[in-house]
Image (cartoon, rainbow, N blue to C red):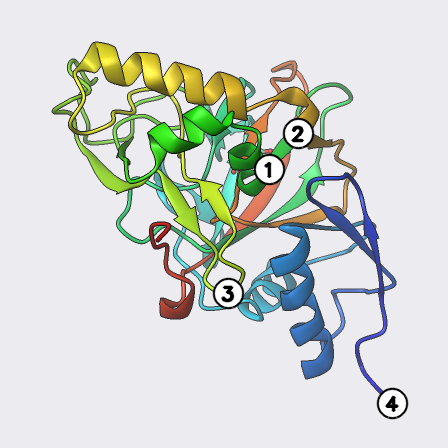
Amino acid sequence: MPDADFAIHPVSPTLGAEIRGLALSRPLGPATVSALAQALDRHLVLVFRDQALSDADLVRVSRHFGPLDKAPITENGRLHAPGYEEVYVISNITENGRPIGALGAGESVWHADMTYLETPPYASGLYALEIPAEGGDTGFLSMFAAYDALPDALKRRVEGLSIKHDSTTNSGGCLRQGFAPPTDVATSPGTVHPLVIAHPTTGARALLLGRRPHAHIPGLSVAESEALLDEIWEAAVRPELAWHHRWRVGDLVMWDNRWTMHRRDPFPNGQRRLMHRTQIAMPVARRLTGAA
Ligand code: SIN
């Protein structure tokens, strides 16, 4: 009997699918794992509702997609779940006057995770333990759809360009520990990637934008780079291309970090939000390469 027995329900025309019929707290067989990896490749974002996962379960499920990174250093230090260095805590909760997690209750702007590294993570999993009554939704955008949305003249202009991904500031607008506020985006710290990347098997093109603040296109003056980046973001990051997840406790959402961006709505700081996140390292075979 095949062990992959679940249903896939797409949630939007551009990306995302809900996986129904799987209890992730139980061990997953090889056929299920392979079918889930294919579903993530195809739909870019997978939603599993009504799960009851311990941190050990979250780590086990995430490891089926690849080796895990340790929790990153945040504006509040390296905040991981007790006993699990791979489980990054995203929360506005404070205990004994200290934040237990990162990103607070504010908006987190459109971004892909840690593209300021040479090799950013391949995927992430975000599991909801406590959610606010209002706000805190997470939006996702397909970067294939974002590229396709560019007018042809803009597609021609961005071909062959690179983009520097800022390493100083996180998606909540906070400085990472050890960095100074950037004063000149042309020289501030970051990593340069191709602006247009291509899927290794289909050849489909996607934009690799990282995040807007403090980005720079090498070879252009700051004024030219700002103007072109604004034009790209306006054409590509359109509300009608995005899909927003309204969280319930027990949801696990996994996304492919190469071909998507995400953002989070703010929520009232008096309400608690507690999410545990894992980050799957980029396998060599999936590394980002520029479009040919
Ligand atoms: C993130 O940007 O990884 C967190 C998103 C969220 O808190 O919903």
Q: Nearer the viewer, mark 2 or mark 4?
A: 2
Mark 4 → mark 1, Cα distance in angstroms: 37 Å
Which residue is located at x 51 percent, y 35 percent? 147
Secondary element under disc 1, as helix, strand or loop, is: helix
- The picture places residue 202, in percent across and down from the top left corner, at 54, 60
Earlier along the polypeptide chain: callout 2 or callout 3? 3
How many other residues sit within 10 Å of disc 2, few (<14), some (14-19) or many (≥20)? some
| In the image, residue 40 above or below residue 212 | below
* Residue named by callout 4: 1
How many other residues sit within 10 Å of disc 3, few (<14), some (14-19) or many (≥20)? few
Which residue is located at x 18 percent, y 21 percent? 220
User: Which amino acid, by three-letter code, is at mark 4?
Assistant: Met
Q: Nearer the viewer, mark 4 or mark 1?
A: 1
* Residue named by callout 3: 201
Relative horizontal placement of residue 35, taking residue 159 as reference (left or right): right
Mark 3 → mark 4, Cα distance in angstroms: 30 Å
Earlier along the polypeptide chain: callout 1 or callout 3? 1
Q: Which mark is residue 241?
A: 2
Whether residue 280 appears in this view of the structure is yes
Which residue is located at x 70 percent, y 32 percent? 243
Mark 2 → mark 4, Cα distance in angstroms: 39 Å
Secondary element under disc 3, as helix, strand or loop, is: loop
Q: Which mark is residue 173?
A: none
Mark 2 → mark 3, Cα distance in angstroms: 23 Å
* Residue named by callout 1: 145
User: Which amino acid, by three-letter code, is at mark 3?
Assistant: Thr
Query: Which residue is most to the left?
Result: 187
Whether residue 76 appears in this view of the structure is no
Mark 1 → mark 3, Cα distance in angstroms: 17 Å
